[in-house]
Structure formats: C-alpha cells, structure tokens
Amino acid sequence: DAGVTQSPTHLIKTRGQQVTLRCSPKSGHDTVSWYQQALGQGPQFIFQYYEEEERQRGNFPDRFSGHQFPNYSSELNVNALLLGDSALYLCASSWTGTSGTGEQYFGPGTRLTVT
Amino acid sequence: GDSVTQMEGPVTLSEEAFLTINCTYTATGYPSLFWYVQYPGEGLQLLLKATKADDKGSNKGFEATYRKETTSFHLEKGSVQVSDSAVYFCALRKQYGQNFVFGPGTRLSVLP
C-alpha cells in the first residue's frame, strides 16, 4: 500500500517565478492538507482540500493556491515567489469519513529553494 | 489562537538515558494531542496520540499522558537509543478532520 507521495523531491526557483507541487494521497484517503515547514520550525498549515474544494485555510496570502482532482490528488501553486517561500512543503492525507480516525499521514515533502 | 510550546533543543543524551521532552498547549475546548517524529530527510511520522484527558498514548517505548489540568503532553522514554535521534513535534487538533497546530520541534541527539 503506497503511502503519501510528493513530487518533485527538490526544486530550485528564482524570485518572481511560479511553482507547482504535487501530492498523491494514501490509498483510501479523500482529504489533502498542505503545510509549509521553514528550516528549524514546525509545519504551518496552508490549506486543506476535500471533495475538490478548499475546506480550510491557514494564514497564507492568496499567492498560495491549490487544487484537488477527482482522484483525490492535489497540487499546490505558489505565484510570485519570494525568498521567504523557501521551505519544505509537506502534504498530508486523511480520511474524512466517520469510520476513520482523522489521522493525517505525511509525505516526505518537497524542498523548495528560492534564489 | 491555538498554540503549542515545546522545550527548546537540541537535547543531547547518552544511549540508555531517560528522555523527557516537555510540551504544553493553549486551546479552547478539548483538543486531541499528538507527537510526531521527523527523521533526517523524511516527512513526519505519527508516534503517539491521546484524544481525551488522562489518556496515555504509547508506542515504541515512548509514552505521553494528556494532562488537562496542566495543559501538557510531555513525551517520555525510559531508555533512548541512537536510532531515536530525530526531531520531535508536539501537535494539537481541535476537532476531528481539522488541521493540526504544531510546536516548533525539539531535536534529540543520542550518543553511543
């Protein structure tokens, strides 16, 4: 059973550019959450997608947007990249159904470096 | 708002030493509490959890007890191993299906 997968593993972009990160949830999961983890800090919640809609959003600007596809996979898009966007971006999946525990399973992350 | 505070690291211990990593939280209501571990170059893995006051979560020799009166969820292990070297994150979740709020993490280094 494949866990949460993310691509790419590493990415280097220039300030002002746009980036798209991808996530495939664990089999059987229908909800995807995205987190930003700056170096030496804990993950910060960006947003959560369920049924192809953004269900919750953390304190991040509109430059951060996302999408969820019918197969539950998800993309995180960041426009007009800033140096401060350099971080590890983590995707977590979970099952929203009442039979689940609501636990989130994390992928290995995408390391984004903005120069 | 909701927040999680952890003891500052890094924590350096010798193998077989006793481990305590303090965690306290601020939140209304009755959140669920979690400990996640992050090994070098990897994502976060759930270590243990507790969903109500006085619950004790345990896994791989680690344990933590949900103390509502002190709003704490301290992580303990009786005898650490070199393989326990990692960053440990305390986290809370207000409601089922909601997002997690993480602490800043505590880096543990265990020396042989």
Image (cartoon, grey):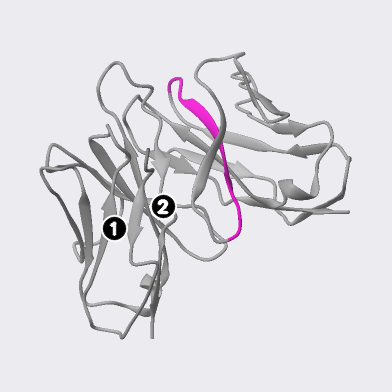
Report the front residue among B82 and B58. Answer: B82
Q: Secondary structure at mark 1?
A: loop
Residue under label 1: A60
Residue type at mark 1 is Phe
Q: Which chain does the numbered disc 1 sit on?
A: A
- Quarter of the image with the C terminus of chain A is bottom left
Quick one: A104 or B50, which is closer to the camera? A104
Q: Is residue B46 left or right of residue A3?
A: right
Tag 2 near tag 1, CB within 8 Å: yes
Residue at position x 60%, y 53% in the image: B39
Magenta part of the protein: which range?
B29-40
Residue B7 locus on image (x, y percent)? 69, 46
Q: Earlier in the sequence, mark 2 or mark 1?
A: 2
Q: Chain of mark 2?
A: A
The residue depicted at 89 percent of the width and 40 percent of the height is: B16
Disc 2 residue type?
Gln
Say the numbered circle drawn on residue A44.
Answer: 2
